[in-house]
Image (tube, rainbow, N blue to C red):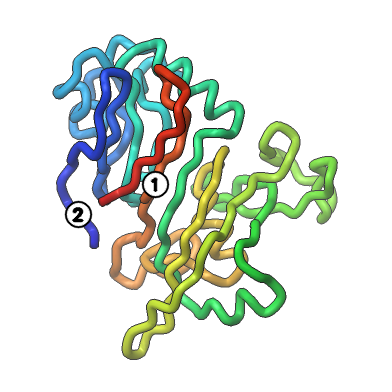
Amino acid sequence: MTETVVRIIAETDAYLVVYKPHGMHCAPLSEGEEGTLLSWGARLCPAILSVRGRKEVERGLLHRLDRDTEGLVLLAKTQRAYDSLSESQERGVFLKEYEALCVGSSSTVLVDRTLPFAIESGFRPFGPGRRVVRPVETDGDGNALSGRVLELALDRGHPYRTNVLALSDASSTGNIRTLVRAGLARGFRHQVRCHLAWIGLPLVGDELYGKADGENLALRAVALMFPDPENGSPVRIDLH
């Protein structure tokens, strides 16, 4: 069920995991901007603002969700925690799981696949203002199979991967829909949305890769898995 209020899901001395609702930006565009997830977290824990992040305005924000995606986001409270968690991201051991409500039937997707399966591609910018991305099939060396592609984005020379973990029927009267559970380690902009649309399961409410249909984007970040930045023990946090 879609929620409308930011709330704390888990907290330690090293990090804060919060639920971000649909319609909220994670990071500000400029210093001091209010109304973002970062500004909300900083009011509770000002130490977040002392962390040096990838960009100066992002501070302790470890990863981002699109404005229209809801779910779990991790914020580091200390520089030590941020550096440790960033290293986990680089090593591909910071994992995220999503639930997506999609238009279409899982039976068409599973004609030549069995669960779990992976969707892999590079990406290229597309359309006016480069608002969207398109998948690009590549060979084992990261070369585009469709010929030379300018601005091909790869994950350190390899395709980006979305793991489809589960599919279940979520159809209602007059609507054929599938609930998808998907996971990824290192992601690219719009990756889950683009990959699912590519295999014939565009998300409900997705104006960029499907049809908006007057509904909110049906994508939720529902689980985070990472090594604890203080002791290295495995952590799994689920949206509840």
Q: Give x and y (percent) for residue 127.
A: 56, 52
Q: Amino acid at mark 1?
A: Ala
Tell me if residue 169 comes above or below residue 46 in the rendering.
below
Q: Give x and y (percent) for residue 68.
A: 33, 51
The residue tagged with tag 1: helix, strand or loop?
A: strand
Query: CA–CA distance between discs 2 and 1?
Result: 16 Å
The residue tagged with tag 2: helix, strand or loop?
A: loop
- Could you classify mark 1 by the number of other residues whose Cα lies within 10 Å: few (under 14), some (14-19), or many (20 or more)? some
**Residue in the image at 49% along x and 78% along y:** 104
Q: Quadrant of the N terminus?
A: bottom left
The residue labelled by disc 2 is: 3
**Residue in the image at 55% along x and 57% along y:** 194
> Is 45 displayed left or right of 174 in the figure?
left
Tell me if residue 166 comes above or below residue 86 in the rendering.
below
> Is 90 displayed left or right of 193 in the figure?
right
The residue labelled by disc 1 is: 223
Q: Give x and y (percent) for residue 171.
A: 38, 82
Q: Amino acid at mark 2?
A: Glu
